[in-house]
Amino acid sequence: MSKPLLVANWKMHGLRQEAMQLLQAICLGFSPLASSMDLVICPGFLHIELAKQILKESAIALGAQNHYLGTQGAFTGEISATQLIDSGCRYVILGHSERRQYFSESSELVAQKCQQAIAVGLIPIVCVGETKQEREHQQTEIIIAKQLAPLFQALSADDFEKLIIAYEPVWAIGTGLSASPEEADSVQQFIQAHIAEHIDLKTHLRILYGGSVKPDNARELFAMPYINGALVGGASLQAESFLKLAYLLAEQKRSH
Ligand code: PGA
């Protein structure tokens, strides 16, 4: 059974000084929990080197928020999976709804990136999730199945063992509205079962929930059996709230 996992997605937030203080405070507060869970911080690209220095003595892993295809080439403004590995990253978030929405990333591109990430030794955290309108039209499972489909073409069963999925309903991201624990858990269960129908998995996949996870709703979410952890935006920008989430995750998964 893999450990629960908490991932901070800092998006395009924070200047160097703020990132430094936040990293130091998280490092300090996290050390008593290091044996009970995995923790990953995904700062903006420019703070990766800084984060690598601060996190090097800690059990906290470093991740990035995206990468492009190929190991090198004429792609102005882009960063490769190989460069991320070279800079000390172990994880990468791929297919976040903000990438899909604002940068027109298709599920096919996300699957290609995912293949690339695994090929160089990164652990991809692939995000899927429906919009409010899709949920209202009872399309959640159809949409997620479509988002997952290219992964079945691009990845082998062995690749799937390395993958993490984050279920993030688009309507819950940064809105303060979270899916109810039961709603979230039933989608997580669907994702687990749907992948198992296509891929011969040896172990259960780690599936995170994301979308307005905060200290005041996390206990109930983390108590759900198919939620193995969380991908956190807003609440990861304050050491106090992020560490509170880490404590709640460790506590809930210990008692279940
Ligand atoms: P949020 O963001 O926690 O601020 O809703 C989550 C995410 O975008 O990964």
Image (cartoon, rainbow, N blue to C red):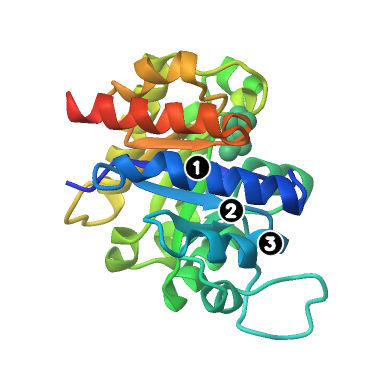
Choose mark 2 or mark 1, whichever is in front. Answer: 1
On the image, which quarter does residue 189 sit in?
top left
Residue corresponding to mark 3: 45
Residue corresponding to mark 1: 26
Residue extending farthest to the right is 76
Measured from the top left, where is residue 169 in percent x and y? Answer: 55, 29
- Find the distance from the CA under tag 2 to the CA under tag 1: 33 Å
Q: Quadrant of the C terminus?
A: top left
Q: How many marks?
A: 3
SS state under label 2: helix
Upstream in sequence: badge 3 or badge 2:
3
Choose mark 3 or mark 1, whichever is in front. Answer: 1
Q: Nearer the viewer, residue 149 or 256?
A: 256
Upstream in sequence: badge 2 or badge 1:
1
- Find the distance from the CA under tag 3 to the CA under tag 1: 19 Å
Q: Residues within 10 Å of mark 2 (few under 14, many from 20)?
A: some
| Label disc, if present, on residue 107 of the rendered structure | 2
Image point 40% across, 42% down: which residue? 30
Q: Residues within 10 Å of mark 3 (few under 14, many from 20)?
A: some
Q: Quadrant of ligand 1?
A: top right
Is residue 146 visible from the viewing direction of this image?
A: no
On the rendered structure, is 130 left or right of 243? right
Q: Residues within 10 Å of mark 1 (few under 14, many from 20)?
A: many
On the image, which quarter does residue 57 sit in?
bottom left
- Find the distance from the CA under tag 3 to the CA under tag 2: 23 Å
On the image, which quarter does residue 145 sit in?
top left
Q: Nearer the viewer, residue 24 or 124?
A: 24
CB-based contact (under 8 Å), mark 3 and mark 1: no
- Residue type pointed to by label 3: Phe
- Residue type pointed to by label 2: Ser
Measured from the top left, where is residue 32 in percent x and y? Answer: 30, 41
Measured from the top left, where is residue 143 in percent x and y? Answer: 53, 36
